[in-house]
Image (tube, grey):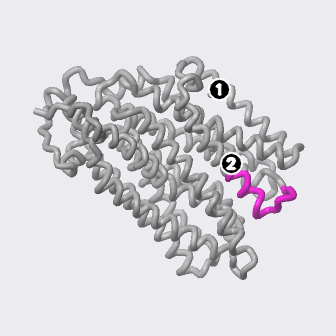
């Protein structure tokens, strides 16, 4: 039979702080590769201008992410979470490094060949994202809500910090010959290093933290098989009890119907966000005083900074929106941003666009954390793991639909 969870200890409380920090770093690493692709969109935009890389690469990424998470979510109860997450972070590391090698091998030249190579690497990013994001969210869903919040704050931080790093590299190299490319090379090298750090943290530190062992032991006692390898890595022996696992366990279909509003919330949040960001930001905001190089980078940074800040707002209890009806109303009202962006790009100056992009990030991060921390409550460990995977499935589904709708902004443009 499964072991009983350990009791509350000062070591466990100390482990909670460490685990929260590690969750933030792992969240950072799980979106770092893709944030890097978005942030160097200025470079690829000049290199592959006629292929609309900011839109095309996003559209390549999402089918692989969505297809993989659909398979993994359906089979989540049978999949070793440790192997799944380590595979995801390893693919992120290898693919980011491959992106760097590809640019070195082609000497930064454009053309259909290098672009197809980048598309293949981006497809690997999508597969890795589905492994890590679904696996981590499922795993953290039966732990503290603070871990979920910290993980999603790390996701947003990947965009913020890559944007800041990109601004620094652009400023440092813009006066040099091929300065834009040299900045991208340094940028990708740093991102590759951080992905390697995430592999080490998840493999050797995270499973051994007392509070993580506590929650995984509790999940194992409720019949979860997905935590066995992580517990074994931490020196905790368990024996799966199939009868316990099946007793009273809700099916994925039942979990979906009980939480259909939460899944739709996430789908609609990301349909709206990705129908605007990043394609519209790079290609449809016009020309302003900041120039073609700096203007989209400032907009991307504004979005990422406010997306990060907003993910900490729900930590203040009275600012956290927990009403199911209230969340749906707020998310539907957010679609007013579509005409707002259209008219701002057409008639307003850059200050209004920066403010509107910041608000897009603010609402995206805040509403995401509210939904993700409220939804898993009231279930046993195996059900919370399954629900976490279902929520990520709809989140990635929303992103997929959003990047497809993003192409509608090109209708009527000569370059379409």
Residue positioned most to the right = 347
**Front-lying residue, 104 or 210:** 210
Is 293 colored magenta in this rendering? yes
Q: Residue at x 23, y 20 (%)?
A: 248
Query: Which residue is at a point 45% across and 39% down the rendered structure image?
Result: 392
Q: Nearer the viewer, residue 106 or 191?
A: 191
In this view, 47 is above or below 231: below
Q: Residue at x 87, y 58 (%)?
A: 289
Q: What residue would you read off at disc 2? A: 407
Nearer the camera: disc 1 or disc 2: 1
Q: Is residue 51 visible?
A: no
* Coordinates of residue 387 in the picture (x, y in percent): 38, 31
User: Does residue 411 show up magenta in the picture?
Assistant: no
Q: Quadrant of the C terminus?
A: bottom right
Answer with the quarter of the image where residue 144 lies.
top left
Residue range in magenta is 287-302
Tell me how many marks there are. Answer: 2
């Amino acid at each position: 039979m499964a072991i009983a969870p350990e009791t509350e200890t000062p070591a466990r409380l100390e482990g909670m702080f460490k685990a929260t920090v590690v969750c933030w770093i792992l969240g950072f690493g799980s979106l770092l590769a893709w944030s890097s692709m978005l942030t160097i969109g200025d470079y690829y935009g000049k290199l592959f201008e006629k292929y609309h890389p900011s839109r095309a690469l996003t559209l390549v990424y999402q089918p692989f992410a969505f297809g993989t998470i659909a398979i993994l979510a359906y089979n989540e109860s049978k999949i070793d979470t440790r192997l799944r997450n380590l595979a995801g972070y390893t693919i992120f590391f290898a693919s980011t490094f491959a992106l760097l090698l590809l640019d070195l091998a082609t000497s930064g030249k454009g053309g259909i060949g290098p672009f197809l190579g980048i598309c293949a690497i981006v497809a690997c990013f999508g597969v890795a994202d589905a492994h890590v994001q679904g696996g981590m969210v499922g795993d953290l869903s039966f732990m503290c809500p603070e871990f979920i919040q910290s993980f999603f704050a790390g996701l947003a931080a990947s965009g913020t910090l890559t944007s800041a790093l990109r601004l620094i590299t652009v400023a440092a190299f813009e006066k040099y010959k091929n300065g834009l490319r040299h900045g991208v090379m340094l940028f990708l090298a740093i991102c590759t290093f951080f992905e390697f750090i995430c592999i080490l943290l998840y493999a050797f530190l995270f499973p051994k933290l007392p509070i993580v062992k506590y929650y995984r032991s509790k999940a194992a006692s409720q019949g979860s098989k997905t935590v066995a390898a992580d517990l074994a890595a931490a020196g905790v022996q368990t024996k799966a009890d199939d009868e316990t696992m099946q007793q009273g366990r809700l099916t994925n279909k039942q979990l979906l119907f009980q939480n259909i509003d939460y899944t739709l919330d996430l789908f609609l949040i990301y349909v709206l966000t990705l129908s605007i960001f990043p394609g519209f930001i790079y290609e449809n905001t016009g020309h302003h005083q900041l120039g073609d190089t700096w203007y989209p980078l400032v907009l991307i940074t504004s979005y990422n900074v406010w997306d990060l800040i907003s993910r900490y707002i729900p930590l203040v209890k009275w600012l956290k929106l927990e009403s199911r009806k209230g969340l749906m109303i707020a998310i539907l009202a957010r679609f007013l941003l579509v005409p707002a962006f259209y008219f701002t790009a057409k008639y307003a100056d850059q200050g209004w666009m920066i403010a509107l992009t910041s608000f897009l990030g603010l609402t995206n991060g805040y509403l995401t954390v509210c939904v993700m921390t409220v939804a898993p409550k009231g279930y046993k460990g195996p059900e919370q793991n399954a629900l976490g995977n279902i929520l990520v499935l709809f989140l990635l589904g929303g992103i997929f639909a959003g990047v497809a709708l993003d192409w509608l902004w090109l209708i009527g443009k000569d370059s379409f």
